[in-house]
Amino acid sequence: MAQRYYIVGNWKMNGMRTALPEARAIDRAAQRLPKVEVAVAPPVTLIAAMREAVENIGIGAQTCHSAEKGAHTGDLSAAMLRESGVEFVIVGHSERRADHGETDAMVKARAEAVQAAGMGVIVCVGESEAQRDAGEAEQVVARQLAASLPGSADRLSVAYEPVWAIGTGRVPSIEDIAAMHKRLRSALAQAYGEAGAAVRILYGGSVNGNNAADLLSVAEVGGALVGGASLTADAFVPILAAAAELA
Ligand SMILES: O=C(CO)COP(=O)(O)O
């Protein structure tokens, strides 16, 4: 494939300073696997320490506010996150959409704020189990994507994460992932023209060392967004190794 696989660990609300040795071990593995682009999005509290601890992996944040500053207690702006040491931000994760009521319009505004601050952005989309069972997954996700995408494809990645596959050990069939990623690729072409071809589409949801090679082999899968299996080097490195093997 033309682009390097992009493998991103989303630590969610996990990790105290005692987790830094895991980040260091992931960093050492990434150094040995230059064909793979590796990143971790730790909780905000670990960003500064992780910046000191690693050299070979990207560091990201898991959400941000769309405003530059102001009366938004508890929120962080894209510029603040950038200053704290991250180079990308995940927006629109289904847990943010569910726990904090983030709408497509909010996700779009956040993605644009991240780009305006000069960082990469990963926009997440995905269907619920009921939507999948109703045969509506592709339409729902394409609609969600169209409404969540920023105006520009600059430093943009998209993560397809079926809600029912997150943390459950269940993954869609290879055929279903292929069909969805194909659909997302054409939605990106519609939104951005030729620039849409450079946008990486990651798969997320119960990715682990055993299934990574199969999932990453699917056409239009340009990487993975990994939750549980990114928290330790023992679980994450086999995923990076699988990506390196395919590169
Ligand atoms: O939500 C995810 C990554 O953002 C996926 O989580 P799991 O890998 O734990 O299923």
Image (cartoon, rainbow, N blue to C red):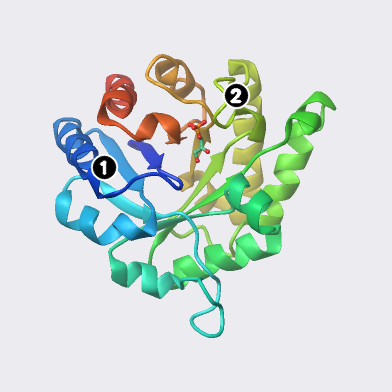
In the image, residue 104 sits, relative to residue 209, either above or below, namely: below
The answer to whether residue 87 of the structure is visible from this angle is no
Residue 117, position as x, y percentages in the image:
41, 72
In the image, residue 92 sits, relative to residue 152, either above or below, namely: above
Q: Which amino acid does label 2 sit on?
A: Ala
Residue 209, position as x, y percentages in the image:
37, 19
Residue pictured at 42% horizontal, 21% vertical:
212
In the image, residue 219 sits, relative to residue 97, either above or below, namely: above
In the image, residue 112 sits, relative to residue 229, either above or below, namely: below
The residue tagged with tag 2: helix, strand or loop? helix
Q: Which amino acid does label 1 sit on?
A: Ala
Mark 2 near mark 1, Cβ–Cβ under 8 Å? no
| Number of on-image labels | 2
Residue pictured at 37% horizontal, 38% vertical:
6
| Relative depth, front residue between 71 and 106 | 71
Quadrant of the rendered image containing residue 245: top left
Badge 1: how crowded within 10 Å, few (<14), some, or many (20+)? some
The residue tagged with tag 1: helix, strand or loop? helix
For this view, does 143 lie left or right of residue 179?
right
Task: Measure the alpha-carbon separation of dots 2 and 1.
Answer: 35 Å
Q: Which mark is residue 188?
A: none
Q: Mark 1 points at which residue?
A: 19
Residue pictured at 58% horizontal, 17% vertical:
174
Q: Which residue lies furthest to the bottom in this view?
A: 70
Q: Which callout, 2 or 1, points at the residue further toward the start of the chain?
A: 1
Q: Mark 2 points at which residue?
A: 178
